Amino acid sequence: MRIKLLTLTTLAAIASASFVYQTAAADRPGYTDTPMLPAGKWHVHDPNRPVPPIVAPGKTFSDGAPPPSDAVILFNGQDLSKWQGTKGPAPWKVQDGYMEVVPHSGSIRSRDKFGSFQMHLEFAEPTHLRGTSQERGNSGVIIFGLYEVQVLDNFNNPTYPDGQCGGLYGQSPPLVNACRPPGEWQTYDILFESPRWDADNHLTRPASVTVIQNGLVLHHKQALLGPTAHRAYGDYKRNTGSEGAIELQEHENPVRFRNIWIRNIPDEEKP
């Protein structure tokens, strides 16, 4: 664990920062008005929820791995032809084999739609540290534009657990904090099972997701309560469909992405 490598002074600083954050969050106007999650134990963005333990990932996992032969290449390091912005072509910067978020330019979305899938991407957080908590290196992988896997710099940067890097935003914290330092490339490998509906628009299977960051499991077949949201929990009161685009979020931070590919996964044959 990375925590073994820290000095007592550093540990004290981190503990102090975490305490200050939790106290401030709990006292923030409107916090007590955030809804209780259906399980009835935690509020959305609850600062008192257990913090995922820090586990130092291995040096490499799937970093830079070439895509399999049947993958759809969403970003090859050269152009954004597979993506679009909210009002036209994708406006983010491309250089040196990566794309970089252009602050205030808007999120981008894949031109193609997918159902259940296996996805790989790599991201790097800005080395110029700005802000704390949700203001540091914020972005996200938003499946179908509805279900967000958070991207955030949580290397020595505490925040509310269900908003941490790798969290299913506002719903489920990651099992561990697997973040590398800012500037280092990190990997997400995401297995997503899309929701299913019957002819009367009743949910027959909720969406679920497995997320691996830098070789460490953050979620394993974790069911989603519905679309993710800020200060709210989602539900399946309406048919959200069983396929959609992949969105990368612009949240005013110059996060970088590279090596993005995806494979469609058909439903397994039933006995």
Image (cartoon, grey):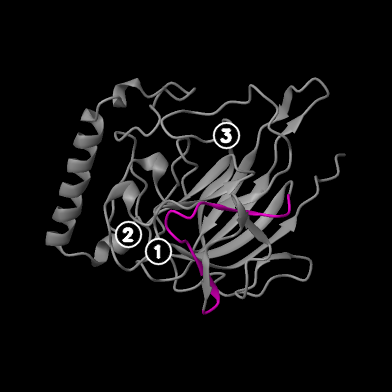
CB within 8 Å, label 1 to label 2: yes
Label 1 vs 2, first from the N-terminus: 1
**Where is mark 3, residue-wise?**
227
Q: Which quarter of the picture shows residue 76?
A: bottom right
**Where is mark 2, residue-wise?**
155
Mark nearest the camera among 1 and 2 is 1
As shown in the figure, which amino acid type bears the numbered disc 3? Pro
**Where is mark 1, residue-wise?**
125
User: Residue 81 at what x, y percent from top left?
Assistant: 68, 66
Label 1 vs 3, first from the N-terminus: 1
Determine whether the residue tagged by mark 3 lies in a helix, strand or loop: loop
As shown in the figure, which amino acid type bears the numbered disc 2? Phe
Determine whether the residue tagged by mark 1 lies in a helix, strand or loop: loop
Q: Which quarter of the picture shows residue 199?
A: top right
Location of the C terminus by quadrant is: top right
Q: What's drawn in magenta, residue-wise?
A: 96-113
Magenta stretch: helix, strand or loop mostly = loop
Within-10-Å neighbours for mark 1: few <14, some 14–19, many 20+: many
Name the foreground residue: 7 vs 234: 234
- Above or below, comparing residue 153 to residue 46 in the picture: below
How far separated are the C-alphas under marks 1 and 2?
10 Å
The answer to whether 98 appears left or right of 182 in the picture is right
User: Residue 196 at what x, y percent from top left?
Assistant: 75, 33
Within-10-Å neighbours for mark 2: few <14, some 14–19, many 20+: some
User: Residue 162 at what x, y percent from top left?
Assistant: 41, 40
